[in-house]
Image: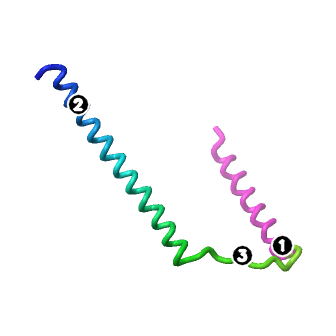
C-alpha cells in the first residue's frame, strides 16, 4: 500500500468513528430530553409548603444543631491530631 492510500483509509475510518459518536450523542441528548419531559408531565414538581412561621428554627432544634457542630469539631480535631507527623 502506498502512503496516500493509508492516509485516505485512516481518514475514512476517523470520519466513520466520529460520525458514529456524533449520532450516538445526538440520540442520547434527544432521549434524555424526552425522558425529562415525560417525568415532568407524569410527576409534576411538588408544591412548596406555605411559610406561616416567622422563626424557622425552634430552640430545641438549635440545641441539636449546636451539639452536632460540637461533635463534628471534636472529630475533625481528633483526625488532624492523629495525622500530624
> Mark on residue 10?
2
Measured from the top left, where is residue 76 in percent x and y?
Answer: 70, 53
How many residues crowd mark 3 within 10 Å: few (<14), some (14–19), many (20+)? few
> Mark on residue 48?
3
Q: Quadrant of residue 31?
A: bottom left
Quadrant location of the C terminus in the rendered image: top right
Sequence-earlier tag: 2 or 1? 2
Foreground of the two, 13 or 73: 13
Residue in the picture at 21% in, 28% down:
8
Q: Give the CA separation, mark 1 to mark 3.
A: 18 Å
Q: Is residue 52 left or right of residue 16?
A: right
For numbered disc 2, what is the local secondary structure? helix
Q: Is residue 52 left or right of residue 15?
A: right
Which of discs 2 and 1 lies nearer the camera? The answer is 2
Residue in the picture at 48% in, 72% down:
38
> Mark on residue 57?
1
Measured from the top left, where is residue 45 in percent x and y?
Answer: 62, 74
Quadrant location of the N terminus in the rendered image: top left
Q: Please tell me whether residue 78 belongs to the stretch shown in magenta.
A: yes
Amino acid at each position: 500500500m502506498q502512503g496516500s492510500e493509508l492516509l485516505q483509509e485512516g481518514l475514512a475510518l476517523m470520519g466513520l468513528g466520529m460520525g458514529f459518536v456524533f449520532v450516538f450523542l445526538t440520540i442520547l441528548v434527544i432521549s434524555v430530553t424526552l425522558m425529562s419531559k415525560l417525568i415532568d408531565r407524569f410527576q409534576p414538581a411538588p408544591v412548596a409548603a406555605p411559610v406561616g412561621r416567622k422563626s424557622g428554627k425552634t430552640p430545641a432544634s438549635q440545641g441539636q444543631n449546636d451539639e452536632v457542630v460540637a461533635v463534628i469539631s471534636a472529630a475533625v480535631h481528633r483526625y488532624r491530631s492523629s495525622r500530624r507527623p
